[in-house]
Image (tube, grey):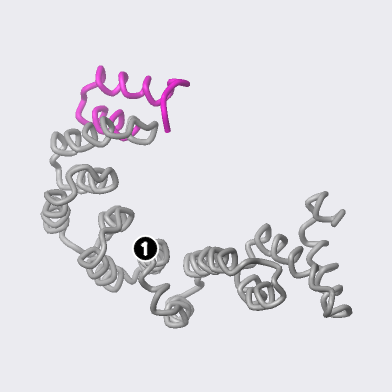
Amino acid sequence: KLQIMDKHWEQALITLTNLRKNYPTYHYSLQLLKNVYIKLNQWGQLNDILPDLERFKLLSSDEVEALAKLTTQHRLTRAADLSSLYNLWDSCSRLRKKDPSIICSYAKRLIDLKEEKQAQVIIEKTLKKQWTSDLTLLYSQLSHIDTTEQLATVERWHQEHPSDINLLLAIAKLAEEDGFHHKAVEHLKQAYSLKPSNHIAGLLAKIYDTMGNSNEALQYMRLMLSKNHDG
């Protein structure tokens, strides 16, 4: 516990591993191991002790479920290669494969590993069944689709979800890439009016600067740097 208090995580891990090996009935070591595994981002090892954490009632069922979900997300986003990623996905329960945050983690890692066509399938299939705002931003990152086609798709989604901020940002991104700067500004301003943030102010400053509108760029730059600004 002193090693944990001093944030000597690697040393604490060695101590707890030995403690669990020599005193397997000392279940409190599992609770400490859980905390150390999280600090060290050792999600696979954490996943291995989840059944014991529940079996010995060190965590409630709800706490175990929340931790299992978090563990799955991190393991998906850290998958070393496509084979590992597919194996992890296949090991997920049917219910977990319907969880928006899990799907986002999976789709994001597919994009990272250049498996964009499969990511597109997952994203479009999911959005038809359940609207998941974060997936629209991931969709705008796909590079294998014609940008004009992507823009038409997100604009169709926008008709049904006119106030979705992530969707507005996706439209703005694709519009700018396709050369429609005024359309990008229009949707960024709409997003900004719904939820002012430093991020959106920065995007507006950047695109106005690209358009040669230094006054507007400066205005949003000041908003972005303002201490009173949200986000």
Give the labeled residue for mark 1.
100
In-image side of 51 versus 229 (left or right): right
Closer-to-camera residue (133/121): 133
Please say whether residue 209 is one of the residues in the magenta stretch. Answer: yes
Q: Is residue 176 above or below residue 100?
A: above
Q: Main secondary structure of the magenta part?
A: helix
- Indicate left or right for 49 with 116 as reference: right
Residue 122 locus on image (x, y percent): 29, 70
Amino acid bearing label 1: Pro
Q: Quadrant of residue 100?
A: bottom left
* Quadrant of the drawing holding the N terminus: bottom right
Dot 1 alpha-carbon crowd within 10 angstroms: few under 14, some 14 to 19, many 20 or more: some
Residue 39 horizontal/vertical position (percent)? 68, 57
Q: At 25% from the left edge and 21% from the top edge, which residue is drawn?
A: 216
Quadrant position of the C terminus in the picture = top left
Residue at 14%, 34% in the rendered image: 182
Q: Choose top left, top right, bottom left or bottom right for residue 152.
A: bottom left
* Residue 140, above or below 89: above
Name the spot of residue 105 as percent of width and height, x first. 42, 64
At horizontal 16% and vertical 57% (from top left) the residue drawn is 150
Q: Is residue 72 left or right of residue 176?
A: right
Q: Which residues fall within the magenta stretch?
A: 202-231
List x then y, in percent, for residue 115. Answer: 33, 71
The count of marks equals 1
Q: Is residue 70 above or below residue 88?
A: above
1 w.r.t. 125: above or below: above
Query: Closer to the camera, 223 or 54?
Result: 54
